[in-house]
Amino acid sequence: MKIGYLGPKATFTDLAARQLFYEAERVPFVSIPECMDAAASGEIDAAIVPLENSIEGSVNITIDYLVHEAELEIVGEAVVPIKQHLLVHPENKDRWHEAELICSHSHALAQCHKFLHKEFKGIPVENMSSTAAAAMYVKEHSGMNIAAVANGLAADEYGLFRAKENVHDYSYNHTVFAVLTKEGHTINLESSEDFKTTLMITLPSDHAGALHQVLSAFSWRKLNLSKIESRPMKTGLGKYFFIIDINLKMDEVLIPGAIAELEALGCSVKLLGSYSCYRM
């Protein structure tokens, strides 16, 4: 089985892939869309991509590409604790505090804003495609005093020195990773007691009370929603769709009944997946 992930080796996505599919062949991709395209074309059996971070919020490129571009469904979700470290080349381990550049993924840099502002105020930062890409960059540029924000797996993979550990601003820092497959394609995942169903809902028109009617369809059925988020339809200002997560596996009565009620109201409803949730 081939599992695609946002690479290179030792990203947090790779970490999630290793834990969920420890016996599978893991294939790195340079971007989230490329990884998702590979799953949609059948090049790989599943793609693992970041979906949401507890500090920085949703990963919009994943949501938008899932809705507008790739014909994929969510078949699993993994919640991974995020521990960010400041990594430098071993040759610079005694002068890490004099780093001339800090590089990482934009989310990782934001997650460590307080630390970076305190220790490296005025030092430029550079966004990379992933935390592991930043670690690789540091490894390949030993002659420059550069620091990367990345995980412990990246430190081990690229032979970097952990100048400072746990530099993230908040102790509770987790990222949700979605497991995506081509529609109708099944993969084997371990059973879980936690389930979730994700719907995409488009309102019929912009009129007062439309969103209230949508939420009422879930409320009176006592369906617990863990998330409701709006994203632009990309068809004009003020036009949005909503992503709703229900803390329940797709059943035969409650969720189908809610969907039928929404469609009767003129809403467009698409099931993005009903799947198991895992905590790492």
Image (cartoon, grey):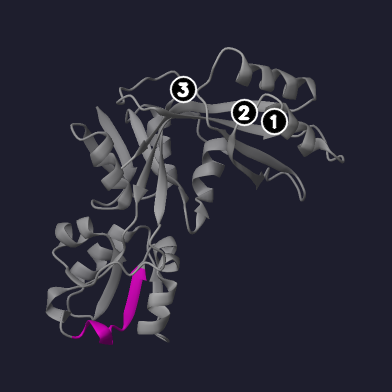
Of labels 1 and 3, earlier in sequence is: 3
Residue in view at x 25 percent, y 64 percent: 135
Q: What element carries label 3?
A: loop
| Kind of residue sitting beneath label 2 | Leu
Of labels 3 and 2, earlier in sequence is: 3
Residue 100 in the image: above or below residue 126:
below
Residue 229 - label: none
Q: Is mark 2 on a helix, strand or loop?
A: loop
Residue in view at x 67 percent, y 33 percent: 201
**What is the distance, in whole Å, between disc 3 and disc 2 at their CAs?**
25 Å
| Kind of residue sitting beneath label 1 | Ser
Work out which quarter of the rendered image holds the N terminus and state it.
top left
- Mark 3 touches mark 2? (CB < 8 Å): no
| Kind of residue sitting beneath label 3 | Glu
* Nearest to viewer (mark 1 / mark 3): 1
Q: How crowded is mark 3: few (under 14 residues within 10 Å), some or many (20 or more)?
A: some
Q: Nearer the viewer, residue 142 or 227?
A: 227
Residue 219 - label: 1
**What is the distance, in whole Å, between disc 2 and disc 1 at their CAs?**
6 Å
95 on left or right of 41: left
Is residue 244 located in the magenta-colored stretch of the structure? no
Q: Residues within 10 Å of mark 2 (few under 14, many from 20)?
A: some
* Nearest to viewer (mark 3 / mark 2): 2
Residue bounds of the magenta highlight: 95-103
Q: Which of 27 and 105 is in front in this view?
A: 105
Residue 203 in the image: above or below residue 116:
above
Give the residue at mark 2.
223
Residue 149 in the image: above or below residue 121:
above
Give the residue at mark 3.
183
189 on left or right of 75: left
Q: Where is residue 228, by image quadrant?
A: top right
